[in-house]
Amino acid sequence: MFPKRLSILGTGLLGGSIGLAVRSRISNCKITGYGHRAATRENAVKIGAVDQSYDNPSNAVRDCDLVILATPVGVFESLLQMIAPALSPGAIVTDVGSTKRNIVQLAEKILPAHVHFIGSHPIAGSEKRGVDFARADLFENAQCLITPTSTSHAEALAAVEGFWRQLGMRTLQLSPAAHDQYLADISHLPHAVAAALVLMQSQAALDLAGKGFIDTTRIASGDAGLWRDIFLDNRDNLRNGAERLRQNLDRLIEMLDQGDGAAISQWLEQASRRRDELLQKKLKDLGS
């Protein structure tokens, strides 16, 4: 069963959860990890997410058949440069990053020809961070986006897709460009909006905030450094999404200025229908 030797570079929430999920679903897999903080390395071993953890990524990937980059996307380039000489012929490298165009280009430029890279993005996680919040069931029934290119190695692609399915995920293939465009709208922009909603408030207003506001802005609690890297890596798509959002808000301002209750109702009802349709689809997916 694949993999036999797995290396997880970055044993935080996602990396730690991958280790725990592999431990519960894939037998006889040796798991090594890398973390730049001693406490993270120690906790990853303590909870059973990895068998052994290193402070040097090159040592963590030796003799591994699958390597997963699970650090913030801003660290990917330096990680690839460090591990490239240590990777075994035929090794497969994938990642869990929220952006894909840049990592695919970096992998093609940095990794040796005898190593295969397949981009992947498990749509799972939370605003919490750190290996202490890792869970073996984090990926159950969630979706993983796989981003091959025209030059991707067919057997490596099948292996990566099969790996995520072994962890209980549903998979969908997209191009790196399509991935970044869609994720800007449904993930990166919502995070920016949640942050903006919090920042625009006076303290007096925040003191009155109820569950609706707390729920709406939950993701604003995410790691600032991680999201900074995502925003910058996908800045063109994020900017485009922000422009389209502004157009929708401008339309709302226009309807308010005109006192057009009928138009406002239509605008809200359309949003309600689309959200309900999405919810029903997601519930159906979870039940399948």
Image: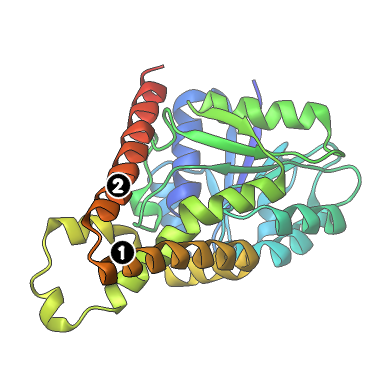
Residue at 59%, 53% in the rendered image: 97
The amino acid at mark 2 is Gln
> Which residue, given by chain and number where applicable, does mark 2 sit on?
266
Q: Position of residue 104 (x, y in %)?
A: 76, 52
Specify few, some or many for label 1: CA neighbours under 10 Å numbering under 14, 14-19, or 20 or more. some
Give the answer, above or below, for where 28 lies relative to 14. above
The answer to whether mark 2 and mark 1 are in CB contact below 8 A is no
Give the answer, above or below, for where 138 lies relative to 56. above
User: Element at badge 2?
Assistant: helix
The amino acid at mark 1 is Met
Is 278 in front, or is 38?
A: 278
Specify few, some or many for label 2: CA neighbours under 10 Å numbering under 14, 14-19, or 20 or more. few
Q: 204 left or right of 286?
A: left
Quarter of the figure with the N terminus: top right
Q: 43 left or right of 61?
A: left
Q: Position of residue 162 (x, y in %)?
A: 63, 25
Quarter of the figure with the C terminus: top left
> Which residue, given by chain and number where applicable, does mark 1 sit on?
255
Residue at 62%, 63% in the rendered image: 234
Confirm whether residue 281 shows in the render. yes
Is 99 in front, or is 65?
A: 99
